[in-house]
Image (cartoon, grey):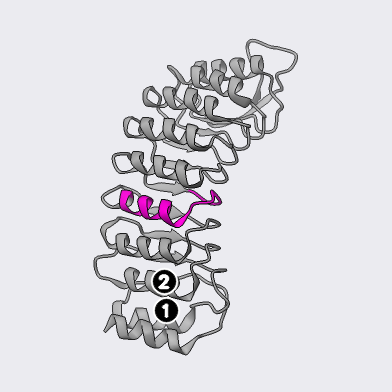
Amino acid sequence: MTYQFVDVCYDIPTATKYGSKLDLGSAKLSQKAVGVAMKQAREQSIEHVKLTFNQLGCAGTGVVATGLVGSKIRVLELWNNEIGGRGMIALAAALPGSQIVDLQIGMNRFGEVGARALARALPQTNISKLCLAFCTLEESGTRWLARGIRDSKLTYLNLRCNRITPRACAELAKALEGSSVTELLLGGNDIGLAGAIALAKSLPRTRIRKLTVDCNKIGEKGQVELLIACASTDCAVECIKFDHNSSTQLVVAEIAVVRALRQRLLVLLRWRKIPRDLVRVIGSHLR
């Protein structure tokens, strides 16, 4: 079913409503059109708003933030909208009073400034799913974000491709201890071996069940450390993916070793090369 906005404006396209979803992705909305769209979402009690690829900028994001007040929006998609630090500050300020539970703001370069504002707001929100992929958080932004995770309601956290360093990963790992996060995506960063070791030490004290650390240069030793941690009876991890981390990949044999000893770990990888020395290392640590 389709409908048009009540306050018709020349630059507002017809939107399609799927149940309670308003999809205006790639609609090239003007700032005025965004305001009308948010007003309509509030009046129609729409729960899911998609505004991806609209080049909203900081000003447009501010309009979205204002529109959250009094709305029923639970899912907000803002991928690739040129949201900078100021835009993220405005959005973060509106989150505690909103009904948002799923926030997707990947591919927006708000860096440390935006991460700091979001971290301060998170504990006061109901957000359980947060996607921050490709947001150039880097070390400083990640460390700020870590401060807001522990007391938040987050269960899903996507931090793919943010240039996260080993030191930032270590701080993030400590913050995850005691948090509600059950699924963590860390692929495409720079956590290295040191970051993998820090993560491995914290995993048994987290609720993480699914972990992705592909493309992080953690090497074979980093993979072994994570497998050993995941095999602990205190660890909740059920699924881990870390392909593209070394020339030889841990797969079938290692899974068999871990399963035989703990009966509960599944590792998702593609390659079939089996380094026998690593099998022996894992086996010796798990006896």
Image position of 19 (left or right of 126): right
SS class, disc 2: strand
The quarter in which the N terminus is drawn is: top right
Q: Quarter-wise, where is residue 57 in the image?
A: top right
* Residue drawn at x 53%, y 37% as measured from the top left: 111
Q: Position of residue 158 (x, y in %)?
A: 48, 48
Total tally of numbered discs in the picture:
2
Task: Give the residue pinned by disc 2.
Answer: 266
CA gap, disc 1 to disc 2? 7 Å
Marks 1 and 2 in Cβ contact (< 8 Å): yes
Residue span colored magenta:
159-175
Name above or below for residue 272 compared with residue 107: below
The quarter in which the C terminus is drawn is: bottom left
- Which residue type does callout 2 highlight? Leu
Q: Position of residue 234 (x, y in %)?
A: 24, 66
Label of residue 255 in the image = 1
Whether residue 21 is visible, yes or no, is no
| Circle nearer the N terminus (1, 2) | 1
Q: Position of residue 162 (x, y in %)?
A: 54, 48
* Residue drawn at x 71%, y 12% as measured from the top left: 9
Name above or below for residue 18 compared with residue 234: above
Please check the rendered image and state whether residue 171 is part of the magenta-colored stretch, yes or no.
yes
Q: Position of residue 122 (x, y in %)?
A: 37, 34
Q: Who is closer to the viewer here, 271 or 245?
A: 245
Label of residue 57 in the image = none
* Residue drawn at x 75%, y 13% as measured from the top left: 10
Q: Who is closer to the viewer here, 251 or 23?
A: 251
Image position of 63 (left or right of 184): right
Q: Quarter-wise, where is residue 262 in the image?
A: bottom left
- Which residue type does callout 1 highlight? Ile
Q: Quarter-wise, where is residue 14 in the image?
A: top right
Q: Who is closer to the viewer here, 227 or 34?
A: 227
